[in-house]
Amino acid sequence: MNLIFLGPPGSGKGTLAMYLVEKAGIPQISTGDMLRAHRAKGTALGLEAQSYMDKGELVPDSVIIGMVEERLAQDDCKNGYILDGFPRTLAQAHALEKIAEIDMVVSLVLDNEVIVRRLSGRRVCPDCNGTFHISLLEDEKKCPACGGQLIQRVDDSEATIRNRLKVYEDQTAPLIVYYREKGLLREIDSSGSVEDNRRELDKVLK
């Protein structure tokens, strides 16, 4: 099954994608990961992408599509895949249609205020790379694993989170409408526990 996962930051998209990777044995494909891999290997696509990034410009859709097309042609995608973070725009969705047949688009739905609470309460430990939430900590400043000093990443500040959510909504709203009209969209309320969300995913996939 060829899937697209849509979901705002903090909606649990990555957690559900990894669950499906383990359960179904299909790869999770992230354009960000692909871009880093091509740059590291110095491929033609990676060098082209780097030339735009060095100038502070967005990598064009044509380059991203080229990477996606190459990745989908690999053997581990023969039985299906999960596209994570792509497409982000209608132009990318139209380009994707020319190189792939998508069976379902899974959209995770979660109230913005819940997302803000989830992400702004996240703390990380630079010493052991642990990630924790303040709701589960006795001491918000001390790592329960190694005793190190916990910090809040810049990306997890409330102002940054709200900006990321607005960008996501602006980009994704047309995609939601587009895939709903095609009959491919399935929405999941991801406000429950990890187990609840897995059961909801299993339901829509069946």
Image (tube, rainbow, N blue to C red):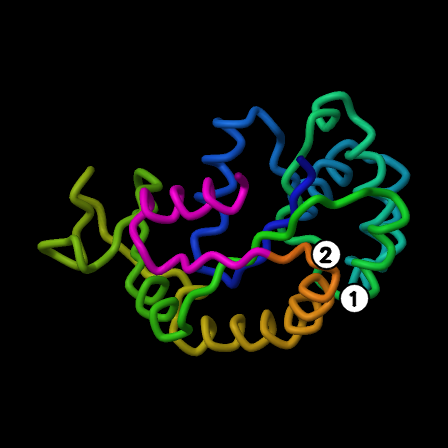
Residue drawn at 69 percent across, 42 percent down: 36
Residue 55 position in % (x across, y down): 81, 64
**Quadrant of residue 156 in the image?**
bottom left
| Span shown in magenta | 186-206
Q: Residues within 10 Å of mark 1 (few under 14, many from 20)?
A: some
| Placement of 200 over or under 108, stated as above or below | above
| SS under mark 1 | helix
Residue drawn at 72 percent across, 56 percent down: 87
Dot 1 amino acid type? Leu
In screen coordinates, is 42 left or right of 11?
right
Magenta stretch: residue 204 in it? yes
In the picture of the structure, the residue carrying the numbered disc 2 is 87
Residue 47 position in % (x across, y down): 86, 44
Spatial CA span between label 2 and label 1 = 8 Å
Q: Single out the residue that lies furthest toward the left.
A: 138
In the picture of the structure, the residue carrying the numbered disc 1 is 90
- Between 9 and 45, the one lying in front of the other is 9
| Placement of 68 over or under 162, stated as above or below | above
| SS under mark 2 | loop
Residue 127 position in % (x across, y down): 31, 41
Residue 9 position in % (x across, y down): 49, 61
